[in-house]
Image (spheres, coloured by chain):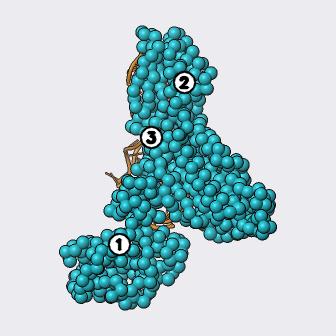
Amino acid sequence: MRFSQLLIPTLKETPSEAEVASHQLLLRAGFIRKLSSGIYSYLPLGLATIRKVERIVREEMNRAGAQELLLPMVQPGDLWKESGRWEKYGPELLRFTDRHARESCLGPTHEEVITDLIRFNVHSYKELPLNLYQIQTKFRDEIRPRFGLMRGREFIMKDGYSFDATEDGADATYKKMHEAYHRIFARCGLAFRAVEADTGTIGGSFSHEFMVLADTGEDTIVICKGCEYAANMEKARCQTPTAPATPALLALEKIETPGKKKVAAVTEFLGISPKELVKTLVYMAEDKPVAVLLRGDHEVQTVKLANALGVNTDNLRLADDKEIFDTTGTPSGYLGPIGLTIPVLADNELTRMHNFAIRANAKNFHLLNANLNRDFTVQTITDLRQVTSEDRCPACGGSLELTRGIEVGHIFKLGTKYSEALKATFLDNQGAEQPFIMGCYGIGVSRTVAAAIEQNHDKDGMIFPLPIAPFQIILLNLSPKDEAITAATNELYGQLGKSGIEVLLDDRDERPGSKFKDADLLGIPYRVMVGKSFSEKGEVEIRDRATGTTLSLPLAEAGAKLINLVRSALAPPE
RNA sequence: CGGGGCGUAGCGCAGUCUGGUUAGCGCGCCUGCCUUGGGAGCAGGAGGCCGGAGGUUCGAAUCCUCUCGCCCCGACCA
């Protein structure tokens, strides 16, 4: 393709609305333009990149035995009522009525539609397993879209759904998808980790998220430096080391702590570490109070707490001062665990603590030398807190690292949640009716492009991994008015094109500096320059965008060299 | 939805507090000359309902009211 004929509206200056690198660069390089909040047009280069990712996704999904189909975007409200999600999904589901006053919605995901399709068309275990996917525009009316393609309201997603007859079969399918996802993101040239994840509102029994590692990621993930263990913060566990030998239990001691409420102030005043204090928090779970006990320096992980209580995170919040007083009789800020009548949950860590400090249920007093089961009891002891970098890996005991990630893929083993809700069943080999065992598998295609840029850029622009670059080579004619140079450039362009190499020919009548700047901005992996050194020595130069290394070689050798470079970069993993 | 900020030419901004000629600047765009290895130079030019509506005033980009849109921070997610 010729640069002069393509719509590539590059910008010298960064639009003020863009905050993160991928958003700024996608705008500056002319890949996308915003239509309204969270809704973007993909220009030719943006679309080319999207198509590259899609192609890899298709190849790997097909290779793993999945089949592509395409489901409707507009979906009847009745189907969502049948699954129960019409009520549950919330305002993120964009709803509208058509001319016949039928309730409808734009598909944010397709569990209902696919399950409906399968229940009417698949009836026997002999037809299973089935694994179906589509690549399509999704719409989710996000509360706050942000960061360009990172969190749009309209975005391109690959969503896949599997149907198995047995648990073992479903687990095998899940494993196959896990492997396929590994291959997909590896082929995209991304540094990523698969992490254990909470199943959230989609529901199901277990799941993994695929995280592209980048400092600007919206998620915090925990990865082990010593083994393969990795998990989302919401799910991350840590070793619960066996309790040290129980020391002598000291007598409770009431001590005045004038005006000290916050953990840091209290422990400083008492001359102890926050690790020697237990704090008492009150939450409202479905509007009923529960107390949570935690070591002073630890933080509650809301998702874990919600799971321990069996409630949805939407129905879980910190109690306000009035609620604390009304339900415990103690003002906020003075509440300790002794004598509580509401349900009490304690974090695992408490089993290892002895002679710790707590609040005394009285203004300006704390108690020293408190002990679990001697001075107070709790109903539940489990993992309720955020893992920290001081914790040890639950799998190998190695040290843990907290890092940021961008969620580009998510796989779930759903089980029978939707098949039961929609009465989607088949007959097993005994002639008994069984619900399909399902899995679902998503990849944010447009987000993957943003994540790739987030992970691969420098001050001059994007640096695409070759497999997902919009073009593999950008060929610069540095002197379009020079006939010899133009003839040489065209010859090379033709040769590469015949070999199936994707070349963007910069034939614009611009000065070299502008072409260099644009080439860097677009992030195309190899830049080939035909100019002064061709006139002087018959040589062209090949510059690697990522490393900046430049290779000069005779025109006659350049084509073969480039074909070689591109093909080796495209070699699939292992 | 709560908190913060912003809407002036395609992009980046000044002007608004303290109302007063024809609303400016840089980049980009058009024409010509010139130039050609890291976003050149000169000359000429086009482009604005100052987000929208209402109000105050002799007079509003500027003050007031309402509204719409956008961005950032939080709870949600591919």
Mark 1 highlights which residue? Answer: A242
Q: Residue at x 47, y 64 (%)?
A: A235
Find residue A456 and name its label.
3
Tags 3 and 1 touching, CB below 8 Å? no
Disc nearest the viewer among 3 and 2? 2
Q: Earlier in the sequence, mark 3 or mark 2?
A: 3
Q: Quadrant of residue A546?
A: top left
Chain A hue?
cyan
Marks 2 & 1, CB-CB < 8 Å contact = no
Q: Residue at x 36, y 58 (%)?
A: A398
Q: Quadrant of residue A203?
A: bottom right
Please state the chain letter of the residue tagged with numbered disc 3 in the rendered image.
A
Q: Identify the chain of the residue marked 1, using the numbered disc in the image.
A: A
Mark 3 vs mark 1, CA separation in Å:
43 Å
First in sequence: mark 3 vs mark 1: 1
At numbered mark 2, what does the secondary structure look like: helix, strand or loop? helix
Q: Residues within 10 Å of mark 2 (few under 14, many from 20)?
A: some
Label 2 resides on the chain identified as: A
The type of residue carrying mark 3 is Asn
- Sooner in the amino-acid sequence: mark 2 or mark 1: 1
In the image, A336 versus A167, the foreground residue is: A167
Task: Establish whether labels 3 and 2 are both on one chain.
Answer: yes
**Given the image, on which type of amino acid does mark 2 rest?**
Ile
Q: Regarding mark 1 in the picture, which secondary structure is present there?
A: loop
State the image coordinates of residue A210 (x, y, percent, origin top left): 51, 52
Of badges 2 and 1, the one in the foreground is 1
Residue on which the image places disc 2: A563
Is residue A177 or residue A168 the one in the foreground? A168
Q: Is residue A336 left or right of residue A455?
A: left
Q: Colour of chain B?
A: orange
